[in-house]
Amino acid sequence: MKKPVFLFLMTVGLAFTLGPLFGQETDLTGTWEGSTYVPDSGDDQVTLVLQKEGEAYSGTITDSMGLANESVLENANYADGTLTADFTIFNGSEYMKIKLTLRLSGELLVGSWESEDGNTGSLELKRKS
């Protein structure tokens, strides 16, 4: 009796672990929170909210500095384990596009952002819901 139960549990465990390698879709839907460092400004807390609509993603991004206040993601694309998107911030004097590139790493989205004026930063987000 123990052997069939053990084999069943191993099969289920392997299915969850190896599923993405065999075409099971990853769903990034939810709220992701983390932090980044903004040059000349300091640490910034970031909240990314993602929704999946068919094969595409949409969402918003907000930060604690007030540069992005539920800024809508544009050109969001998730392929080969990487999410890319653009969004717009207001830095107090002008609007500026930011390019976001995040790779799914376990329970984290890890990557970077780059502003159109050349500033960059790393970003690590963890799913909250």
Image: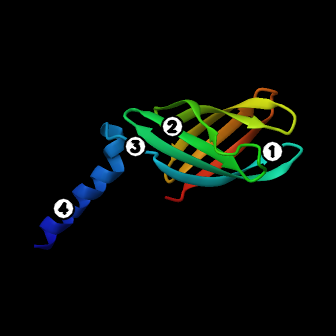
Seen from the viewer's position, the closer of residues 113 and 91 is 91
Q: Earlier in the sequence, mark 4 or mark 3?
A: 4
User: Residue 67 appears at what percent x and percent y?
Assistant: 77, 43
Counting residues from the N terminus, which is met first, the one under dot 3 or under dot 1? 3
Task: Return the x and y of residue 118 as percentages of the image width and height.
Answer: 80, 28
Q: Inspect the image, locate mark 3, and give the three-letter code of the amino acid beneath it.
A: Thr
**Residue indicated by mark 3:** 26
Helix, strand or loop for disc 1: strand
Label 2 secondary element: strand
Query: Given the image, on which type of amino acid does mark 1 rest?
Result: Val
Q: Earlier in the sequence, mark 1 or mark 2?
A: 1
Q: Horizontally, is 24 left or right of 56 in the view? A: left
Residue 6 sits in which quadrant?
Answer: bottom left
Q: Which residue is mark 4?
A: 7
> For mark 2, does the 10 Å Cα neighbourhood hold few (<14), some (14 to 19), or many (20 or more) residues?
some
Give me the C-alpha separation between circle 4 and circle 3. Answer: 25 Å
Dot 4 or dot 1, earlier in sequence: 4
**Earlier residue among tags 2 and 4:** 4
Foreground mark, 1 or 2, reads 2
Which residue is denoted by mark 1 in the rendering? 38
x 74%, y 37%: residue: 89
Query: How far is the residue under mark 2 from the one under mark 4?
Result: 40 Å
Label annotation for residue 58? 2
Of pointers 2 and 3, the one earlier in the residue sequence: 3
* Helix, strand or loop at mark 3: loop
C-alpha gap between disc 2 and disc 3: 15 Å
Q: Nearer the viewer, residue 72 or 8?
A: 72
